[in-house]
Amino acid sequence: MLLELLEGGSPEHAAIHTPGDGTSVTYSQLREQVERLCAQLNALGLGRGDRIAIALPNGLEMIASFLAAAAVGTAAPLNPAYTLGEFEFYLEDTGARAMIVPFGGGDVARAAAGATTPIIEASIDRERKVQFSAATTAGAAREREDVNPDDIALILHTSGTTSRPKRVPLPHRNLMISSSNVAASYALTSEDVSLCVMPLFHVHGLVASTFATLLTGGTVVVPPRFNPLSFWAMVRDHRVSWYSAVPTIHQVLLSRSKAGTKPAGAEQLRFIRSCSAALAPQTMSDMEERFGAPVLEAYGMTEAAHQMASNPLPPGSRKAGSVGQGTGVSIAILNDACDLLATGETGEVSIKGPNVFHGYEGNPKANAEAFTGGWFRTGDQGYLDEDGYLRLTGRIKELINRGGEKISPLEIDALLLTHPAVAEAVCFGIPDRVYGEAVAAAVVLNGSATEAELIAHCRSSLSDFKCPKVIHIVQSIPRGATGKIQRRNVAAEIGER
């Protein structure tokens, strides 16, 4: 069913550009390539129900391999930078029957596969076509089977910040609905060109940047990785009309821009989308001033096949500090007793919708905790305002409990970012002998400031109990593979320093 993504594009219209090697393929060429790769996977003994791991960098090989793996069996994309132990865990946990790696590369992934998981190499030939080659097969050749909308197209894992990662199975139907929701939210057409700077082993890059664009017949520009030095040149040269990224990437682009000077190519942008982590209102304001395009904050997660809410395009109202209204999903706020809360009351953000998954794979305990009366409890805390816009106040497990006072780290992040010398900020809890937990923060500076000055800045706007007890001035803040900050990991790493 995911192959229906390729049916909306005009045959001769460009579907994929890869600036790294200059490759460009049309919709008809991409359809032909994917169909041929499907036949190769069937010939290697892979078919319906088989998990096919993919450890490839962003590019045409990744997109074509993913679509073929999902059409034949189930795609299980993995971060190519995983360690040996991580590869071994994910291969075993997903039950992968084969793994696709770059031709002549992916040494760590190959080592993890050992003699038990067949390796398939992906390469691009002289005609710029993706090819598979394998020394061994996964079994006897299989016939191509029709795809059911409820067949699992994609298997991913939660980030696992506080427990063992959980498997999230996403059917074709959910991914198509979520892609359609993204396309409708931003009025995407065949004239749009998206720049995919998010990794394609994550739903953000897959669903928002890639699938939604292909669904509407547009063009996806896919560099091998995000590079701030070449970013605006790509926007200019490929006439990019929008891009979606985590706040980390937006902040890097801001740090390299000059006030009062719009980067070349920025005038072509219809909008900029921010998702997968909270965007501070100050960052949003700075982006709109520097880049001259509306910034639309959205809300997504793996369990919902990505998007759940978004701020609207102009002339709709964008609310800084809000992730917008539900897009194809119902949003409710529940308390600990599972009661629905009224407008303005803070509780756990919960969702219902056709793109929401039906449960973690092989984990009844997690499912019992996550679902209440048909609502999926996201683990995020927030409230709905009078216009139905969702405002997130933090991850429930990341709230700082200072003597019974629950403190949202997002509020302190946002305030620190209003200081002119602060480029990045993350707040977290540290042990405290008297109060149980105290507030701490780590900041990256782009100017001159001392810890005392930053604490004074916080005290000018926050109650005493919310003010950081200590602020670490660091060169960089640790992040996960997709650029998201995991506060518990930051606290642990700062503590080690």
Image: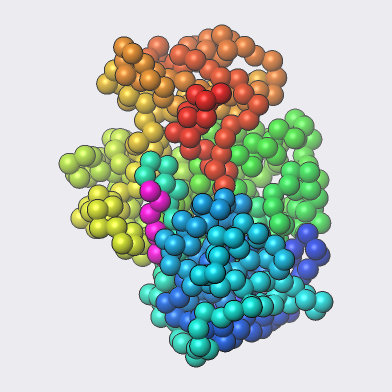
Q: In this view of the protein, can residue 121 be seen by the observer?
A: yes
Q: Residue at x 20, y 45 (%)?
A: 338
As drawn, is 79 to the left or to the right of 17?
A: left
Q: In this view of the protein, can residue 415 be seen by the observer?
A: no
Above or below, 336 relative to 419:
below
Q: Residue at x 23, y 40 (%)?
A: 335
Query: Does the stretch in magenta take in 39?
Result: no
Provide residue 170's location: percent of width, then percent of height: 42, 65
Provide residue 316's location: percent of width, then percent of height: 52, 48
Provide residue 258's location: percent of width, then percent of height: 77, 32
Residue range in magenta is: 164-170
Looking at the picture, tell me which residue is in the foreground, 365 or 398. Answer: 365
Provide residue 157's location: percent of width, then percent of height: 44, 55
Looking at the picture, tell me which residue is in the foreground, 386 or 468. Answer: 468
Count all numbered tags in the image, as a single digit.
0
Above or below, 218 relative to 238:
below
Q: Residue at x 68, y 65 (%)?
A: 102
Above or below, 73 relative to 106:
below
Q: Identify the image's colour scheme: rainbow, by chain, secondary structure or one colour.
A: rainbow
Q: Residue at x 46, y 44 (%)?
A: 323
Task: Report which quarter residue 183 is drawn in.
Answer: bottom right
As drawn, is 340 to the left or to the right of 130?
A: left
